[in-house]
């Protein structure tokens, strides 16, 4: 059966969506019922050095206002704290809390479990081949922290 390039893109997106949806369901079953993919992207960006709303917005390719709303949710859930920056009292510095790190660690563990399910479903050799082929096509670091905003980026074309 011949497939189009669009079919391939949808299959890849479907695989991503299947894994993420299963992880969100499992997180909820484990007591983390309010985790969303953007929360993980944001916490990972903060842990990697995005220590204020402006930098988080840049790394996620979202507005500073959207970053501030995301930060507010993360703080409300106890996953991130903000406090004065020791270098500049006018700024607030973000930090992932131990609970935030726990959420990320549990999520990673769930993805490991989901990978094992796929290995059982299609076979270890087939999964390894799939991973090698995807790595050859897209490189070793497939997703950057700015992924949530990649659809919204301006490519210089006419606005709709």
Image (cartoon, rainbow, N blue to C red):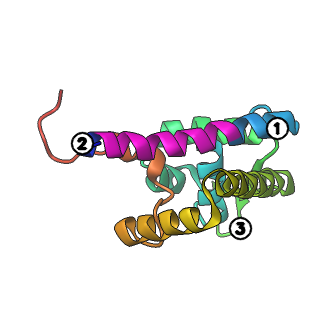
The Cα–Cα distance between marks 2 and 1, rounded to whole angstroms, is 38 Å
Numbered disc in front, either 3 or 1: 1
Residue 63 visible (yes or no): no
The Cα–Cα distance between marks 3 and 1, rounded to whole angstroms, is 32 Å
Q: Secondary structure at mark 1?
A: loop
| Residue that appears at 82% across and 43% down | 78
Find the residue positioned furthest to the left: 158
Please state if 93 lies on the left or on the right of 127 as rendered.
Answer: right
Q: Earlier in the sequence, mark 3 or mark 2?
A: 2
- Mark 2 Cα shell of 10 Å, populated few (<14), some (14-19), many (≥20): few
Residue 10 visible (yes or no): yes
Number of disc labels: 3
Place residue 101 in its image quadrant: bottom right
Residue in the foreground of this view, choosing between 34 and 110: 110
Q: Is residue 53 magenta?
A: no
In the image, which residues are magenta? 7-22
Across and down, in percent, residue 80 comes to 75, 49
Residue holding disc 1: 32
| Residue that appears at 48% across and 43% down | 64
Place residue 154 in its image quadrant: top left
Residue holding disc 2: 4
Q: Which mark is residue 86?
A: 3
Numbered disc in front, either 2 or 1: 2
Residue in the foreground of this view, choosing between 1 and 6: 1
Q: Earlier in the sequence, mark 3 or mark 1?
A: 1
Q: Is residue 11 magenta?
A: yes
């Amino acid at each position: 059966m011949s497939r189009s390039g669009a079919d391939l893109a949808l299959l890849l997106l479907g695989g991503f969506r299947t894994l993420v949806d299963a992880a969100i369901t499992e997180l909820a079953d484990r007591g983390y019922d309010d985790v969303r993919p953007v929360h993980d992207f944001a916490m990972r960006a903060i842990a990697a050095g995005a220590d204020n709303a402006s930098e988080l917005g840049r790394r996620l390719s979202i507005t500073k206002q959207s970053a501030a709303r995301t930060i507010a949710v993360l703080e409300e859930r106890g996953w991130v704290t903000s406090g004065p920056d020791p270098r500049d009292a006018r700024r607030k510095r973000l930090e992932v809390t131990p609970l935030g790190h726990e959420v990320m660690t549990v999520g990673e563990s769930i993805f490991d479990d989901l990978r094992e399910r796929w290995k059982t479903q299609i076979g270890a050799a087939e999964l390894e081949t799939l991973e090698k082929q995807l790595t050859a096509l897209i490189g070793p670091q497939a997703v950057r922290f700015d992924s949530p905003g990649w659809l919204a980026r301006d490519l210089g074309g006419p606005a709709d």
